[in-house]
Image (cartoon, rainbow, N blue to C red):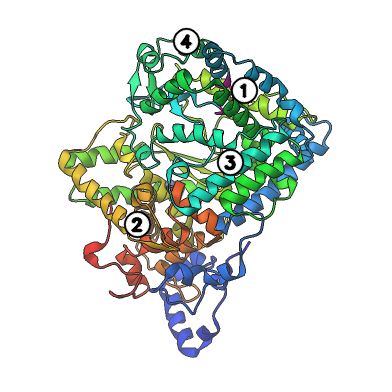
Amino acid sequence: MVEPRFVLETHMRKTIAFFFLAIFFLLTRGMAQQSGKKGIDRSMLDPKCKPCDDFWRYATGAWADKNPVPADLARWGKFDELSEANLERLKTIVEAAAADRSATGDRKRAGDFYTSCLNPSGDANLLKPEFERIAAIQNRGDLAAELTRLQFDDGLGPLRITDVSDPQDANSVIAGINAGGLSLPDRDYYLKDDQRSKTIRDEFVRHVNRLMPLAGIDHPTGALVLDFETQLAKATLSNVQRRDPYQRMHKMDFVLLQQLTPSYDWKAAFESAGLSTYLPVNVSEPEFLKIVNRLIDEAPLEAWRSWLRWRVAKGRSQYLSQPFYDEWFRFERGVLSGIEKKQPRWKVCVSSTDQTLGEALGKLYVEKHFPTEAQRHMQQMIANLRAALGEELQGAEWLAPDTRQNALRKLATFDARIGYPVKWRDYSTVQVSRDSYLANKESAVRENRKFQLAKIGKKLDRTEWTMTPPTVNAYYTSARNSITFPAGILQPPFFDMEADDAVNYGAIGVVIGHEMGHGFDDQGSKFDADGNLKNWWTDEDRSQFEKRAACIVNQFDGIDVGDGLHHTGRLVTGEAMGDLGGTAVALRAYHRSLGGKPAPVIDGFTGDQRFFLAFARVWAANQRPEAMRRQLATDPHPLAKFRTNATLANMPEFHLAFACKLGDPMVRPAAEQCRLW
Ligand SMILES: [Zn+2]
């Protein structure tokens, strides 16, 4: 990892520079402690690129040139550097657990799970019981029964019951029915006509036809599987449509659900899950349910059997012996993301333990790697960010008093969660042995499904987390109105107890602002302070807000990514709004933290310059072209370059800090600049 260091530039040694520096230090003596902190590491910069031409390149170019994507990854950036460093730490922890024969409880479970993964021997025999059940499907009733049983699996079937917050009463957990069943990353992969999409579909058919013989099914069924899933894809909402919570809200009672899909045995599904049929249900995509019903009635049983066998084989392939894993990797990682080389097995197994027993491993991780001072410092920063966003809302003159009050109330009730959950998940019912990786995984999946289903009909548990503590990321949830920062992201270059405030506010400060921003983005703004999907805007304010969001949609629609590719503005709106709002709020919070004193100059950079450099540095990254295409098609996050440049092109504070002028590529004309508040 590239550590920022306090380095004086040679040219600063000139007498005149020293003179100004001396005057400056005299003026800011009260901030001696602050100026002793680390500033920006110049070794990442590309001095040949002007900051006002391409700030991302200027701030991270030298790093990017020295850091190509490793053969076993799809992207390599500062995020990934941290994730890799965390994998090493987790490896030490889990290997120690595995070596300790006296380990008990979660530590033993994590060590045994990891060991079972290192050299899995499972072959086609382990799929036999599933395949026999599928072969026994002789009529539509058998089919309905098998689909019911599959809901305890990890999303193999097209439909399943899951736990969701009631959109109108976030405190109640109700049953949700979502659309599933696609093996490719998104509906567009089935429906688009460009050459690249067609090639991927051909490769998919080949993949099915290579994997199934390993599972003991010799006749080629790839084309049939693709055709079956294409019918599902046609009835699935696009990822842009899915961003609108109102498009996903279709609350109904059990009778209506059954009328929508008369051939699906919901009664058995609810009973086997131990659920009352008196509870309300939210169906996210009713049209999809109609198509599934039609397929249950009309698709040839052989098509269903082939598809179900494929879904079982696909779902299990990563957990079986080498030939299965190799074919899984060739398509999922190679064809879809362009990754050339498999990861060393230990990395696969550490990641898998994190995904499967995340809080068991996470508890051991935070004991070693999360100091309590970090928690305190984060709380201070969050308090400052909250106050800064409050000021922005107070200053947004276009908001009617009622709307402003509602927004302030939402801000005041943000639940900030830092490091790790207050209550740890109990894995004691998961059966883990050193013998079978697949059996361990199946047990974990089954117990996890039971855990989810048991929440339905109860009050929302506000303490629960959906990311594991070592994860290098952060998130906002609208139902809980919470912002969450796992321990994994609270380290350099995001968060550094040794760094000066400008650097911390530019990095983790923007992350905090970004997550707060999700509470007010195109989706989050539709939920109130209690997490309910309920309008709290006047019509006039809402239409003003929509205009501000549309500014960002237009900006991203207009960005040329190269290679004939472009961003979809309506897919990335929320994330881009989070970035713009988050950066503005974090900068304001940084200024507040100075308490009226001038910011120190460190390494020749002003406070604001360090803030923006620290922001850009977080987005240092290289990416494979295949992974970039996949991100553009499926991911609501813009590419790293545009998260940096498109955000800053809207900010006069940035233009001022680097003396950028109208006409420079990093400057959008004032009339076109997007602003949230
Ligand atoms: Zn986000």
Residue under numbered circle 3: 205
Marks 1/4: CA distance?
Answer: 21 Å
Q: Position of residue 374 (x, y in %)?
A: 55, 49
Quarter holding the N terminus is bottom right
Q: Nearer the viewer, mark 1 or mark 4?
A: 4
Q: Nearer the viewer, mark 4 or mark 3?
A: 3
Secondary structure beneath label 3: helix
Look at the image and say whether residue 202 sits in the magenta stretch: no
Foreground: 627 or 434? 627
**Above or below for 152 versus 388:** above
Residue under numbered circle 1: 447
Residue under numbered circle 2: 556
Residue 290 lies left or right of residue 207; in this view the side is left
Query: Which residue type does callout 2 highlight?
Result: Phe
Please say if the residues under marks 3 and 2 sit with CB atoms less than 8 Å apart. no
Query: Which residue type does callout 3 highlight?
Result: Val
**Above or below for 168 versus 571:** above
Secondary structure beneath label 4: helix
Foreground: 391 or 94? 94
- At horizontal 59% and vertical 23% (from top left) the residue drawn is 305
Secondary structure beneath label 2: helix
